[in-house]
């Protein structure tokens, strides 16, 4: 197993175990991968021919365009966009024969669809993220220390819970899969119970009869519920 994956996986599980916040460790891994890829896209790798070929071909989704804008490196982004737009223009304009045959529009529509459905950064993240989920599953199967880290997690968001269990089912034998499923289910059920109670208490606090009662852990219950259901890092408490 490559250290390039075991180190960040262990770090993310340790951070979430020790943090006062409630974060999914797989969301933590994804967030770090995403930030790294966004920075690299406008960094030194931007000028590497292999990278430029891929960014020209695949472009970026709207979410990652927004993140690239926030890097405040407008010159690098403009250079990436310049060659990307050239690629799109060449794919969409057609030539003499396609114009005569009336297929230029079909070609342009196909090209537009390809660009709008691909993202260089998404694909880079997904490739590494899949390996990190696999690494977490395999570490659980033979590393008692990591197993303890997993059992100490506060929760896994539902999208990553699904991916973790699917990977475990594919990579582990029946016995070890059953052990992991039991440990993760206990974590999820306990967190769901607490979160449901926190949400209920949050709603009660808008009833004048509970006005003098403390908020307990309910102030950020909405944010935590959204993070559980859709994935993502829980915002810091204000």
Image (cartoon, rainbow, N blue to C red):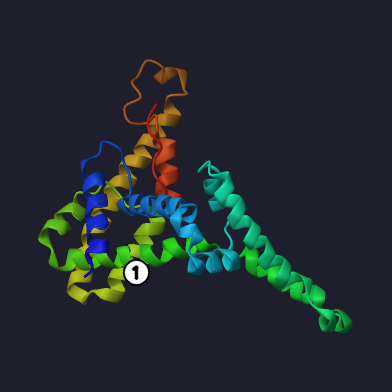
Residue shown at 40% from the left, 52% from the top: 36
Badge 1: how crowded within 10 Å, few (<14), some, or many (20+)? some
The C terminus lies in quadrant = top left
The front one of 195 and 25 is 25
The front one of 62 and 94 is 94
State the residue lying farthest toward the left.
144
Counting from the top left corner in percent of width and height, residue 175 is at 17, 73
**Total tally of numbered discs in the picture:** 1
State the residue lying farthest toward the top.
212
Counting from the top left corner in percent of width and height, residue 167 is at 32, 69
Residue shown at 55% from the left, 50% from the top: 76
The front one of 183 and 27 is 27
Residue shown at 30% from the left, 51% from the top: 25
Left/right of residue 13 with respect to residue 214 in the rendered view: left
Task: Please determine whether, in this image, residue 81 is positioned above or below residue 139.
Answer: above
Residue shown at 59% from the left, 61% from the top: 59
- Say which residue label 1 marks: 166
Q: Is residue 181 visible?
A: no
Q: Secondary structure at mark 1?
A: helix
Counting from the top left corner in percent of width and height, residue 112 is at 70, 67
Left/right of residue 76 with respect to residue 156 in the rendered view: right
């Amino acid at each position: 197993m490559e250290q390039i994956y075991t180190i960040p996986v262990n770090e993310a599980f340790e951070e979430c175990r020790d943090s006062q916040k409630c974060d999914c460790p797989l969301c933590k891994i994804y967030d770090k991968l995403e930030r790294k890829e966004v920075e690299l896209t406008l960094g030194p790798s931007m000028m590497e021919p292999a990278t430029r070929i891929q960014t020209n071909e695949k472009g970026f989704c709207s979410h990652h365009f927004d993140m690239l804008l926030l890097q405040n490196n407008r010159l690098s982004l403009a250079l990436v966009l310049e060659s990307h737009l050239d690629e799109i223009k060449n794919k969409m304009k057609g030539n003499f024969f396609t114009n005569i045959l009336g297929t230029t529009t079909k070609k342009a529509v196909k090209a537009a669809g390809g660009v709008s459905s691909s993202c260089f950064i998404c694909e880079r993240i997904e490739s590494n993220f899949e390996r990190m989920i696999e690494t977490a599953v395999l570490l659980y199967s033979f590393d008692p220390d990591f197993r303890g880290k997993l059992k100490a997690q506060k929760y896994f968001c539902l999208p990553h819970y699904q991916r973790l269990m699917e990977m475990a089912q594919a990579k582990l034998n029946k016995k070890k899969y059953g052990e992991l499923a039991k440990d993760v289910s206990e974590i999820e059920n306990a967190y769901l119970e607490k979160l449901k109670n926190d949400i209920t208490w949050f709603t009660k606090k808008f009833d004048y009869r509970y006005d003098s009662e403390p908020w307990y852990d309910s102030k950020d219950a909405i944010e935590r519920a959204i993070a559980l259901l859709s994935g993502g890092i829980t915002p810091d408490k204000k």
